[in-house]
Image (tube, rainbow, N blue to C red):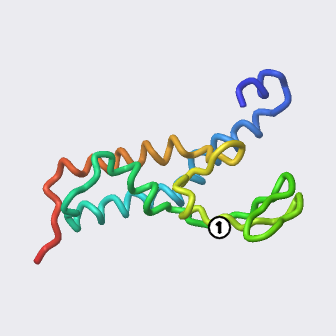
Amino acid sequence: MEAAGAAGRVGTAGLHYQVFTLLFAGQLTTDPTVGVLVARLLLGEPDPPADLVEDTLRRYPAAPFTLWRFTTGPVALAGRLPAHAPVLVDLRATGLPFGAGPHYCLGAALARLEGIRGGRLTRLPLRLPK
């Protein structure tokens, strides 16, 4: 974005919009992730993983949406699919909560940062009342 702005391909309003999008669009997914982290801590999992944040993102993605993708060429998948055939991908089955390649989530770093902040609650004596 910085290079595009410097080259005049994106105006100031466009740059402001992108910053706004990165900061606020991620809130809809990072808030539930922190909630799941807190719930896992309160439930007192017997053997929490060493990297609770990454494990939570993998096992409980905040946006477990199914996404349409299209084949780039003929593919053998439950039969034969031609090029440009629609394929519905369930993100929960991929183990990639932020996608990959050109579809990689721009907010992944923000989500991890928020998760780490929520994961710091492990230092507090959290427990549910009996």
Point 76% across, 65% down: residue = 87
For the view shown, which residue lies furthest in the bottom direction? 130
Tell me how many marks there are: 1
Within 10 Å of disc 1 (Cα), the crowding (few <14, some 14-19, many 20+) is few
Where's residue 123, x and y in %? 18, 47
Q: Is 129 displayed left or right of 95 in the figure?
A: left
Horizontal side, residue 130 vs residue 13: left or right: left
Instruction: Tell me if residue 43 comes above or below residue 17 in the rendering.
Output: below
Question: Which image quarter: residue 3?
Answer: top right
Looking at this view, is 59 or 41 the one in front?
59
Q: Position of residue 59 (x, y in %)?
A: 43, 61
Residue 122 placed where, x, y %? 22, 51
> Which of the 4 image quadrants contains residue 31?
bottom left
Q: Is residue 21 above or below residue 81?
A: above
Question: Which residue is pictured at 57% across the width and 58% down the height?
Answer: 94
Secondary element at image label 1: strand
The correct choice, above or below, for 50 with respect to 6 in the image is: below
Q: For this view, does 36 lie left or right of residue 44?
A: right
**Observer-nearest of 10 and 34:** 34
Q: Quadrant of the N terminus?
A: top right
- 113 relative to 118 in the view: left or right: right
Instruction: Give the residue at mark 1.
Output: 66
Quadrant placement of the C terminus: bottom left
Residue most toward the right? 83
The residue sitting at 18% across, 62% down in the picture is 46
Q: At label 1, which amino acid type do we have?
A: Thr
Return the residue found at the far left.
Answer: 130
Residue at point 88% right, 59% down?
Answer: 84
